[in-house]
Amino acid sequence: MLKKRSLLLWVLLSVALMAGLLVQAASKNLEVWIMQTGNPAGAEKMMAEVNKEFTKANRGVKVNVSWIPWTGAQQKFLTSIVGGMAPDIAELGTTWNPDFAAMGALEDLGPYVEKWGYGADLLPALKESATYEDRLYGLPWYAGNRSIYYRKDWFDEAGIKEFPTTWEDFIKVAVKMTKDTDGDGKIDRFGFSVNGASQHEFLPLIWMNGGEIAVKTEKGWKSTIDTPESRQALQALADLYLKHKVSQEGSVTWNVLSSRKAFETGSQAMIIDVAPLVPKFLENPNLKDKFAMAPLPYLKKPASFIGGSNLVMFTQSKKKDLAWKYLELMLSAKYQMAWSEAVSFFPARVSLLEDPKFNKDPYLSVFTQQMKYGRVYPAIPQWGQVENSRILLKMMQQIMMGKMSVEQATTEAAKTMNIIFGYSED
């Protein structure tokens, strides 16, 4: 009996010891969620280098990196938060940041950034995307914006020496580029793609015309998509499609993938798109040495949407100091540049955008110059609902299809947005 008790005691002690070791090991593990990229091999290689350096400096620590698909990611984050299984650190799309901050899921990084000393070097627009109720709940990791890709060879043939900067001149060029090239009586080359299913391309026109998408009032956030400035901007874009007919008829349902394909196949003279296409187009024998970049033409003043991703720390993390050390390393100049190389976007630190790799490059410098005029959508929790319900896309498509006037469509969109915002004049 004594031997059995001793054996049982030994087993219990062993189990307790193993459990203690497992808890201790888990306490030294960092869970990091990063969104999947278009270059998984390059991204994984860079993160492996970060982890190697981090674990060397922090003995006994293990970093588990999970690659999360963008599709369904918001729900995955919500499920992990509700279940008490949120990661320590994660990458969030800029428009998601306010929503998760409002639910109390994210750690206020302001105190950490104050000690860090590089807060002023972060891109202001992206920093705004991570700010909720005057507190910083995320740190900009990388930046992306949009510029004009255009067929320089066709411009040269037409005697157009400089890309237009104003909207009025842009219309003239778009009309000139739209033509029947084979003489069969049908237009087969179009000047510009008006994508009805890509709000990142048409909403900046509102800022260019001195308007806002939504503003904060004493009664809360209010949609301003129906103001004269907003309506004039949307009408200007719709006119390219309806009046000047410089875009394919089917582009009312196009997104960037559609216009990209049209540019590659030679039926489009100008498109709006992101920087990662530059190396792809340079490798394309049908486009190499035939395309160039230009800033977005504007109505009253320059503006562009700037997006990207933020890095966040979850309040559920029990290793916040360790998590901050990891964030510091990821946001260092060394790894900001390495990540930029891996994903073909830009660092989120102003000083790094001055690197010759960007500001001396004839293509990339156009994007970095436009960062000066970068804007983000309203940093409010409900913005994700506005995007997910496709209110603004439906609005633009109704206008382009001639089913609603700009006044009618914007009035309806503003009403729906205000319901989501919880705004009322009463």
Image (cartoon, helix red, strand yellow):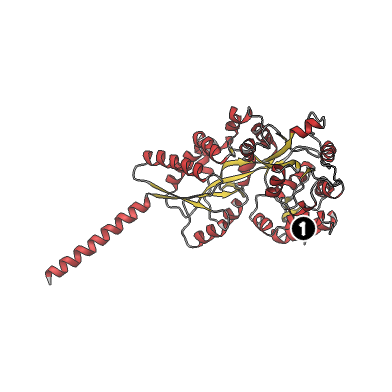
| Quadrant placement of the C terminus | bottom right
Q: Residue at x 48, y 56 (%)?
A: 86
Tell whether 63 sits left or right of 154.
left
Q: Residue at x 71, y 43 (%)?
A: 265
* Amino acid type indicated by mark 1: Ala
* Front position in the image: 174 or 348: 174
* Front position in the image: 410 or 106: 410
Residue 79 on image: x %, y %: 52, 61
Tag 1, which secondary structure? helix
Residue 122 on image: x %, y %: 58, 37
Q: Is residue 320 visible?
A: yes
Q: Residues within 10 Å of mark 1 (few under 14, many from 20)?
A: many
Q: Residue at x 77, y 41 (%)?
A: 208
Whether 246 is drawn above or below 77: the answer is: above
> Mark 1 = which residue?
413
Q: Residue at x 58, y 56 (%)?
A: 71
| Quadrant placement of the N terminus | bottom left
Residue 24 on image: x %, y %: 33, 53
* Front position in the image: 377 or 154: 154
* Front position in the image: 392 or 285: 285
Tell whether 160 sits left or right of 273.
right
Residue 324 on image: x %, y %: 46, 44
Tell whether 9 sits left or right of 208.
left
Tell whether 316 sits left or right of 3.
right
